[in-house]
């Protein structure tokens, strides 16, 4: 008879907190995917624009104008683009060895967050 214990499969995963650098790396990749999807959507719309009939083109332009002029769309797109740009610069800075110590990393994250918020308020 085999005894089964109620233990987690990977006990080490519950001990560690997510690291700041790994979270920024994951979010950087997700923002790149979102930017790629947006570029593909624009490319698809341009393709439809070239091959659409006048009636379909009128309908397509109405959809584009309603989605593109939305404040939420502009805000999210600006947030994603500025996050991706600033995080890329922060990553280059850390690759050069400027944020190897924990206190410098914390200052870098705070500066990054302030710059991101300032860019968003300027964008509005």
Image (cartoon, rainbow, N blue to C red):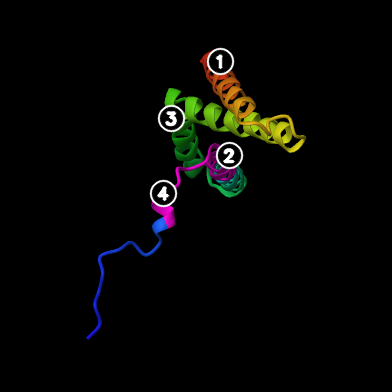
The CA distance from mark 2 to mark 1 is 22 Å
Could you tell which of marks 1 and 4 lies nearer the N-terminus?
A: 4
Q: Residue 113, relative to residue 10: is it above or below?
A: above
Q: Residue furthest right?
A: 96
Residue 73 position within the rendered picture, expressed as x and y whole percent measured from the top left: 46, 29
* Residue matched to label 1: 118
Mark whose residue sits in front, 1 or 4 = 4
Left or right: 29 as drawn, with respect to 68: right
Query: Quick one: label 2, few (<14), some, or many (20+) residues within 10 Å?
Result: few
Tell me the CA gap for discs 3 and 4: 47 Å
Q: Is most of the magenta stretch helix, strand or loop?
A: helix
Earlier residue among tags 3 and 2: 2
Tell me how far mark 3 sits from mark 2, CA to CA. 37 Å
Q: Which residues are magenta?
A: 12-32
Q: Is residue 23 left or right of residue 43?
A: left
From the image, which quarter does the N terminus lie in? bottom left
Lower sequence index among marks 2 and 1:
2
Mark number, residue 51: none
- The one nearer the camera, 89 or 110, is 110
Mark 3 surroundings within 10 Å by alpha-carbon count, few (fewer than 14), some (14 through 19), many (20 or more): few
Counting from the top left corner in percent of width and height, residue 71 is at: 44, 22
User: What is the secondary structure assignment of the residue under circle 4?
Assistant: loop
- Contact between labelled residues 4 and 1, with CB atoms less than 8 Å apart: no
Per the image, the residue denoted by label 3 is 66
Q: Which mark is residue 21?
A: 2
Tell me whether circle 2 and circle 1 mark residues in contact (CB < 8 Å).
Answer: no
């Amino acid at each position: 008879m085999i005894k089964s214990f109620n233990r987690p499969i990977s006990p080490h995963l519950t001990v560690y907190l997510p690291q700041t650098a790994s979270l920024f790396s994951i979010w950087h990749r997700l923002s790149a995917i979102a930017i790629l999807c947006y570029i593909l959507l624009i490319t698809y719309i341009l393709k439809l624009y070239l091959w659409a009939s006048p009636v379909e083109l009128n309908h397509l332009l109405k959809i584009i104008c309603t989605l593109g002029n939305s404040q939420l769309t502009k805000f999210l797109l600006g947030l994603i683009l500025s996050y991706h740009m600033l995080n890329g610069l922060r990553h280059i800075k850390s690759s050069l060895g400027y944020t190897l110590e924990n206190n410098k990393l914390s200052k870098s994250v705070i500066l990054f967050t302030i710059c991101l918020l300032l860019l968003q308020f300027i964008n509005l």
